[in-house]
């Protein structure tokens, strides 16, 4: 029996990943930059054993169906092949999220799975190798190997596409991210399907790709100079550009709901009143607001009269993946 356990934290991209150059290897079309957060994480234990004949996957103590299990099995196959192991595994995953409002993340989930499975089979991977492995499960997971700021360098092969830590002299500890959980009645389009449709059909996609290098450079300069306003501006711009591409896809789609727009407008209004804060959004209707930690309470007060407290989740910079002893 070979057992390993890991805890990985989710990350939110400030410069977004949107589109794949290679769908099988998950090589992205552009570099991205993220902040790992403390509020949401996944703990996963993987036990490879001769006593079972097929993989079993439990999420939050519930045995998952064959569709969810196949995804985990495919990922485990990568780890098994690296370790020359043909044992089946029991995977137990727990998502730790402050509310039950659909905030579970594939980034923390696949990073934790990569960490636990590779630890179980004693692969002893360096961070960049673990990042490469996590990337094969879900692109954004490769950034959750690191605490604080990380950049996923797209590279051009399985070997060269991985995340690296961005030196920041602790700037991430000056920041807060407030999640605004909004309701959405629309049917979901997974980020995997959404980004692929955008790459293949959106008239705006070439514009997105052209703009990323400048935005990435701005974000890295802002981090180096601890310039919150510059980082906030480019974060919001990157999200708006990414979401702009989906409107020109065929068929067109958007992850925004009416409530998302209301929250975005509220953020602009609060900013116009003198409190520096900036929004970002991912493949769903929730809005995340970046603010300096010293202004976190003031922002929560400003949001208070418009948004119910239960809809707000406060996060700060989180740590790197941790391999846990059982
Ligand atoms: C990001 N997103 O940079 C972007 C912005 C959503 C919007 O990475 O297909 O679950 O597994 O590589 O990583 C979410 O997509 O997609 C994502 P796959 P993933 O965070």
Image (spheres, grey):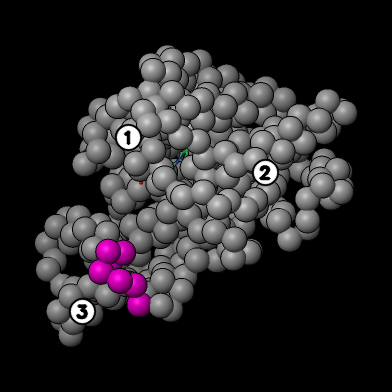
Q: Please report whichever mark, 2 or 3, sits nearer to the chain's N-terminal start.
A: 3
Q: Which of marks 2 and 1 is nearer the N terminus?
A: 1
Crowding around mark 1 (Cα neighbors within 10 Å: few <14, some 14 to 19, many 20+) is some
The answer to whether any part of residue 151 appears in the image is no
Frontmost residue, 48 versus 261: 261
Alpha-carbon distance for marks 3 and 1?
Answer: 37 Å
Badge 1 element: helix
Query: Where residue 259 is drawn, which disc sits there?
Result: 2
Position of the N terminus by quadrant:
bottom left
**What span is in magenta?**
63-69
Quarter of the figure that contains the C terminus: bottom left
Q: Residue at x 51, y 25 (%)?
A: 244
The tag earlier along the polypeptide, 3 or 1, is 3
Please give the label number shown on residue 196. 1
Secondary structure at numbered mark 2: helix
Q: Which of marks 3 and 1 is in front?
A: 1
Mark 3 surroundings: few (<14), some (14-19) or many (≥20) residues within 10 A: some
Total labels: the figure holds 3
Q: Does mark 1 have its CB less than 8 Å from ligand 1? A: no
Q: How far apart are marks 2 and 1 (CA)?
A: 26 Å
Which residue is tagged 3?
Answer: 49
């Amino acid at each position: 029996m070979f057992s390993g356990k890991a805890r990985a934290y989710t990350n939110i991209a400030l410069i977004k990943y949107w589109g794949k150059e290679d769908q099988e290897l998950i090589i992205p079309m552009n570099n991205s930059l993220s902040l790992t957060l403390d509020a949401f994480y996944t703990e996963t234990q993987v036990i490879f054993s001769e006593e079972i004949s097929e993989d079993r996957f439990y999420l939050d103590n519930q045995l998952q169906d064959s569709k969810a299990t196949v995804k985990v099995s495919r990922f485990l196959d990568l780890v098994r092949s690296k370790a020359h192991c043909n044992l089946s595994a029991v995977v137990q995953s727990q998502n730790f999220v402050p509310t039950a409002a659909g905030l579970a993340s594939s980034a923390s989930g696949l990073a934790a799975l990569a960490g636990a499975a590779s630890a179980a089979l004693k692969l002893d991977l360096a961070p960049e190798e673990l990042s490469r492995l996590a990337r094969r499960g879900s692109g954004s997971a490769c950034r959750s190997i690191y605490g604080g700021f990380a950049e996923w360098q797209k590279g051009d092969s399985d070997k060269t596409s991985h995340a690296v830590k961005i030196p920041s002299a602790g700037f991430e500890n000056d920041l807060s991210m407030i999640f605004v959980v909004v309701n959405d009645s629309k049917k979901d389009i997974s980020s995997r399907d959404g980004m692929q449709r955008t790459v293949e059909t959106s008239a705006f996609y070439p514009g997105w790709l052209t703009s990323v290098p400048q935005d990435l450079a701005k974000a890295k300069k802002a981090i180096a100079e601890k310039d919150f306003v510059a980082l906030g501006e480019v974060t919001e711009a990157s999200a708006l550009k990414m979401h702009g591409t989906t409107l020109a896809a065929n068929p067109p789609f958007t992850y925004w709901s009416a409530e998302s727009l209301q929250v975005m407008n509220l953020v602009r209004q609060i900013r116009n009143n003198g409190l520096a804060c900036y929004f970002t959004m991912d493949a769903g209707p929730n809005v995340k607001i970046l603010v300096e930690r010293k202004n976190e309470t003031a922002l929560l007060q400003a949001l208070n009269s418009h948004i119910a407290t239960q809809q707000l989740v406060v996060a700060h910079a989180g740590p790197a993946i941790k391999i846990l002893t059982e």
